[in-house]
């Protein structure tokens, strides 16, 4: 059946018109014995995506955005089948695989539609460019895949997750403020302890990277929030607006903190925005879009300032403990250690992204939205500078 698939691919994948897609789908619909080979070739396209630096979540995100949820499910099925061939997977892949959408049954709703959807997906996969890798691809040597556990895991991260979950769930702003503040304090101190341990043991001297999705709507405000969280946790963030993600560069303990805190703050901010918007609507206002945009921009700006203050306080306290002869920083030369790590993160980010740009963000136009967003950030105890954007 390979000649049929070759004909279908020639018609559908190497042209950009709907007629070619229909021709290819018709050929495949009439050849049910070609199904297995069709899927096998799809897995090859997925494998090429790994070689170009893409991760499972990246692929599904761009497919969902550019095609639809059904195509995202088809991509998830191909990904799940392709990764079975690897005895070990890189860090973070398992959690991404666990979050993939369910794959639709093959041949539904009919053979032509199924073949057409697969060919449309393959057409998109073929266009994925090379992007900056944020870890080894599957199938790499075991040494490259292995990541030593961070000291204090899982107890420390479990405690932080529990605090943030409570902050997201509570209906009392003061309680959420206290819980989020405590979580940030634990993150900052954990990062300092990790830096000192690495300096003493000569370990973990190389920063890594992860990618975090930044989805529409209001993606600019969300990217600014993520940038603020990354900066406060001694990381660098570079937003790729074309593909809907931000790459965060930093040491492993700090990357974990960024992922946890950003997710929680986004949940808290969205919930606060929804409540504030409901009050505005009750008062007869209808400018929903401008209110939301202004709210999230203010929230991001204010959160960034508070996160930076919290990190500065935690660092000063740890340094004072060391200078007084006690605590985690005793006799450790904390500030030079942190400065060296900051330099390593900056060097790694500049090598990964030799060309970045900054852009002027459109200002908030809704005063009520800005005011409510600032108040929500104050309650969350957590805005920041304009994110770097890949050129």
Image: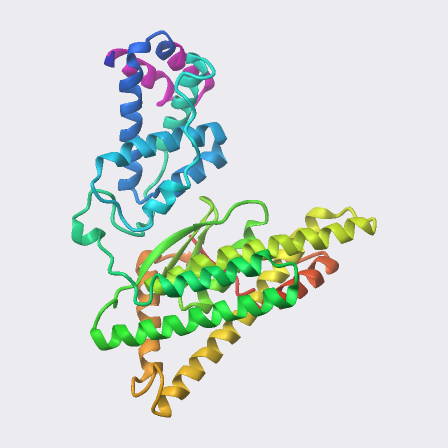
x then y, percent, for residue 362: 62, 56
Q: Does the magenta stretch include residue 342?
A: no
x then y, percent, for residue 29: 38, 10
Q: Nearer the viewer, residue 337 or 354?
A: 337
- 370 vs 51, left or right, is right
The residue at 73%/60% (across/down) is 367
**Residue 325 visible in the picture:** yes
In the picture shown, does residue 219 fall above or below 122? below
**Residue 360 visible in the picture:** no
Q: In which quarter of the image is residue 146?
A: bottom left
Instruction: Give the position of the N terminus as an image quadrant.
Output: top left
Specify the farthest residue to the right. Answer: 284
Magenta span: 3-26
Q: In which quarter of the image is residue 7?
A: top left
In the picture shown, does residue 121 fall above or below 323? above
Specify the farthest residue to the bottom. Answer: 324
Q: Which of 273 and 128 is in front in this view?
A: 273
In the picture shown, does residue 93 fall above or below 348? above
Q: Which of 232 and 381 is in front in this view?
A: 381
Q: Does the magenta stretch include residue 19?
A: yes
- 174 vs 331, left or right, is right
x then y, percent, for residue 28: 35, 12
The residue at 83%/52% (across/down) is 283
């Amino acid at each position: 059946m390979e000649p049929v698939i070759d004909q279908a691919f020639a018609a559908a994948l190497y042209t950009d018109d709907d007629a070619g897609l229909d021709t290819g789908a018709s050929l495949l619909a009439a050849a049910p014995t070609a199904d297995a080979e069709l899927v096998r070739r799809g897995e090859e396209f997925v494998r090429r995506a790994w070689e170009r630096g893409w991760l499972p979540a990246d692929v599904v995100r761009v497919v969902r955005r550019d095609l639809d949820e059904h195509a995202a499910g088809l991509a998830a099925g191909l990904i799940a089948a392709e990764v079975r061939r690897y005895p070990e997977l890189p860090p973070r892949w398992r959690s991404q695989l666990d979050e993939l959408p369910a794959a639709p049954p093959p041949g539904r709703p009919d053979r032509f539609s199924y073949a057409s959807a697969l060919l449309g997906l393959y057409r998109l996969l073929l266009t994925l460019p090379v992007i900056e890798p944020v870890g080894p691809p599957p199938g790499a040597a075991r040494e490259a895949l292995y990541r030593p556990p961070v000291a204090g895991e899982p107890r420390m991260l479990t405690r932080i997750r529990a605090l943030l979950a409570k902050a997201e769930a509570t209906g009392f702003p003061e309680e959420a403020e206290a819980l989020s503040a405590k979580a940030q304090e634990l993150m900052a101190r954990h990062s300092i302890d990790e830096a000192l341990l690495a300096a003493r043991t000569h370990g973990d001297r190389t920063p890594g990277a992860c990618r975090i999705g930044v989805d529409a709507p209001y993606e600019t405000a969300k990217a600014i929030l993520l940038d603020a969280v990354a900066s406060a946790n001694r990381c660098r963030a570079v937003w790729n607006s074309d593909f809907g993600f931000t790459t965060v560069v930093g040491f492993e303990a700090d990357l974990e903190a960024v992922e946890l805190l950003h997710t929680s703050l986004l949940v808290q901010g969205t919930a606060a925005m929804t409540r504030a918007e409901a009050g505005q609507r009750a008062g007869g206002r209808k400018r929903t879009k401008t209110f939301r945009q202004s709210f999230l921009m203010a929230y991001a700006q204010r959160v960034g300032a508070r996160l930076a203050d919290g990190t500065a306080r935690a660092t000063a306290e740890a340094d004072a403990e060391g200078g007084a002869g006690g605590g985690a920083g005793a006799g450790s030369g904390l500030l030079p250690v942190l400065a060296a790590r900051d330099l390593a993160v900056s060097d790694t980010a500049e090598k990964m992204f030799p060309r970045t740009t900054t852009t002027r963000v459109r200002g908030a136009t809704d005063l009520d939205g800005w005011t409510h967003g600032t108040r929500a950030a104050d309650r969350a105890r957590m805005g920041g500078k304009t994110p770097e954007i890949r050129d």
